[in-house]
Image (cartoon, rainbow, N blue to C red):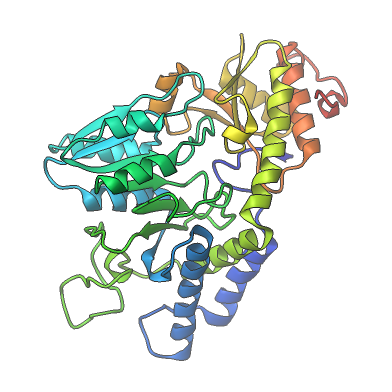
Amino acid sequence: MIYLDNAATSFPKPPLMLEAMRDFTERVGANPGRSGHRLSIEAGRVLLDAREQIAGLIGASDPFDVVLTKNATEALNTAILGLAEHGDHFVTTSMEHNSVSRPLRYLQDRGAETTIVQADPLTGRVEAEDVVAAIRANTKAVIMTHASNVTGTIMPVADVGEACEERKVVFVVDAAQTAGAVPVDVVSMHAGLVAMTGHKSLLGPQGTGALYVRPGIELRPLCFGGTGSSSESDVQPEVMPDKLESGTANTIGAAGLAAAVRFVRSVGVEEIREKEIELAGRLLEGLSRIAGVRVWGPPTAAERTPIVAFTLEGVASDEVAFILDRRYGVLVRVGLQCSPWAHRTLGTLPEGTVRASCGYFTTAEEIDRTVGAVAEIARGRGRAGQPAAKGAAGEDYR
């Protein structure tokens, strides 16, 4: 099996992640912040460890500025809906995930305004000056993906963030595809809010994520309830991160996330980035040599995360993905990737694309086998009724 769906969720995971989750279950298991006994205190330390690891990764000075969430979607909803007031204006881009577009559509139906800045249909890139030009006097926030989940295109977030800071506009960054894969620094990005998910390039378990909240930014909670603090009051506490973290935490998930982020930091994001650029470049080069294949997004691997989206002339994308899975054991993502705005921008709506996404544990041999498989499908071999040539998927098509 060749797993190339890391942009959806990374696989495999570092063994340390599973070990940490097993250790929490077998040795701790208690509810953090709800009791004064030793196991509850130890569970609280697990949450703190997760915050500290994430803060260290993204350059945040205070781990209590890191709110633990169940994924980037919850983090983005907390950011967007927590900021919004009636009549606010938001700026975003045409490459955003539904985790941004749907909350904004919800707000539009209730009196907010949204300006969608169009990306280049060839590369998926949004120019910083176009985003800045859309800012108005009543703009509450600019919401922008750090990298597209469709094309992998890396956006000029630092330039946009600097302009937002000068204009006192909150800058919200969707780092779901970049945290752990591309350096993320909240200071150099001038970010007010940064949403992350734990199960992609942070190599953690599903059901984990985080939202960085810069001090001074006030958000309304999405959820109200028990926090283990200020229990004498029926009013939601203002102290962070309790204000935004009601209910029993996913502590077992936090244990796994902390271990996974510790692994990422020990390897180094720069080293991970270098390896993934090499893998994506190998895939880009191989696919570009196949007649009938069109690769979407920027021309070089350095301009993207290790995502390579492509289509094959004359063969539906869902059929390509099905054949890759069933006949070659190559697992990819097909369709719209929960980003219809991006596909409308590229002109790939409604069919979408085949998205192959490398990860830290992907090998060059797996890339070459994938290229070989796509080449066979393009030649009409390997489809229904056409036996794949033995060993062909292992050829080096570079």
* Quadrant in the picture for residue 98: top left
Left or right of residue 378: residue 215: left
Q: Residue furthest right?
A: 390
Q: How many marks?
A: 0
Q: Position of residue 145 (x, y in %)?
A: 42, 40
Judge whether residue 93 can be spotted in this image. no
Quarter of the image with the C terminus is top right
In the image shown, does 251 or 82 lie closer to the viewer? 82
Left or right of residue 96: residue 293: right
Vertical relation: 229 (above or below) 367: below
Q: Residue furthest front?
A: 166
* Quadrant in the picture for residue 329: top right
Q: Position of residue 389 (x, y in %)?
A: 85, 19
Quarter of the image with the N terminus is top right
Q: Residue furthest bottom?
A: 37
Vertical relation: 219 (above or below) 286: below
Give the residue drawn at x 79%, y 30%: 369
Give the residue drawn at x 51%, y 36%: 154
Q: Position of residue 219 (x, y in %)?
A: 24, 58
In the image shown, does 382 or 59 lie closer to the viewer? 59
Vertical relation: 96 (above or below) 6: above
Judge whether residue 104 can be spotted in this image. yes
Vertical relation: 209 (above or below) 162: below
Q: Position of residue 241 (x, y in %)?
A: 33, 68
Give the residue drawn at x 39%, y 34%: 96
Left or right of residue 107: residue 100: right
